[in-house]
Structure formats: structure tokens, C-alpha cells
Amino acid sequence: MTPNLHPAVAAYFEQFSPQRQQILRDFRQRVLQFVPEAHESMAYGMPAYKTQGKPLVYFAAFATHIGFYATPTGHKAFATELAPYKQGKGSVQFPFNQPLPWQLIETILLYRKQQNEQHPRK
């Protein structure tokens, strides 16, 4: 069961078309499916998730893509797998006109969860 949507995250989703909202909901559902203990909030103007008091991932919708932020370690650890996608500092862009790479996203989520467990905030 997916927890209730954080009010600020709900407001963020509502600014997009129904099609984009569904993609954002699917992204959120995957985060909470694979990391159910993640704390949901908004940070930097986008849905944000933390574990162990540390950032897990962020994501955001843009005109042509969904931005995925698995900083600080997620992008470096999966550089080869993420190479086909446009990237910025600490971000990767998954185009809306292509299927989202759910298996890769799930693998990165579990990796980030493990990183936060190994190095919790003190």
C-alpha cells in the first residue's frame, strides 16, 4: 500500500497534465515500493525522498523529460548504464517519448538505500 501523498508533493503533481501526473505517480510508487521507509517531502522545488536522514533521490517533470537526481553516488555508480541519457551535474534526463528504464531506476534506488544505510547521518 502506498502512503498518502505529501500535500506539497500533491500540489506539485497537480500543476501537470493528467498524463504527466500519472508518470510522476508511477515514479513515486516505485520509490516507495522499493524503499518503503523513505520520508517524502519537497526540496529544491521537487519531490524528495530521504532515508537515514540523508537524501535518497529527487525527481521532477519538465517539458520533454523527467529529471532524476540520485546524488551524490547514484549517477557515478551507474555511469555506464546512464550513458545513453542526457545528463547534467547530478541529474539524468529520461525523455517522455521513451519508456522509462524502470529496472535501472529500481536498481539505483536500492543502491542509494544501501549507501544511506552504510553511512547514516549521525
Image (cartoon, rainbow, N blue to C red):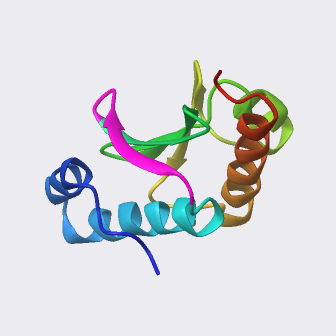
In the rendered image of this protein, does residue 106 appear above or below residue 85? Answer: below
In the rendered image of this protein, does residue 77 appear above or below residue 109? Answer: above
In front here: 41 or 66?
Answer: 41
Q: Quadrant of the C terminus?
A: top right
Q: Can you see residue 98?
A: no
Q: Residue at x 43, y 74 (%)?
A: 2
- From the viewer's perspective, is 89 left or right of 47? right
In front here: 25 or 52?
Answer: 52
Q: Position of residue 30 (x, y in %)?
A: 55, 66
Report the span colored magenta.
37-45
In the rendered image of this protein, does residue 18 appear above or below residue 44? Answer: below
Q: Position of residue 84 (x, y in %)?
A: 72, 42
In the rendered image of this protein, does residue 55 appear above or below residue 20? Answer: above
Q: Can you see residue 60?
A: yes
Give the quadrant of residue 100: bottom right
Q: Position of residue 115 (x, y in %)?
A: 77, 36
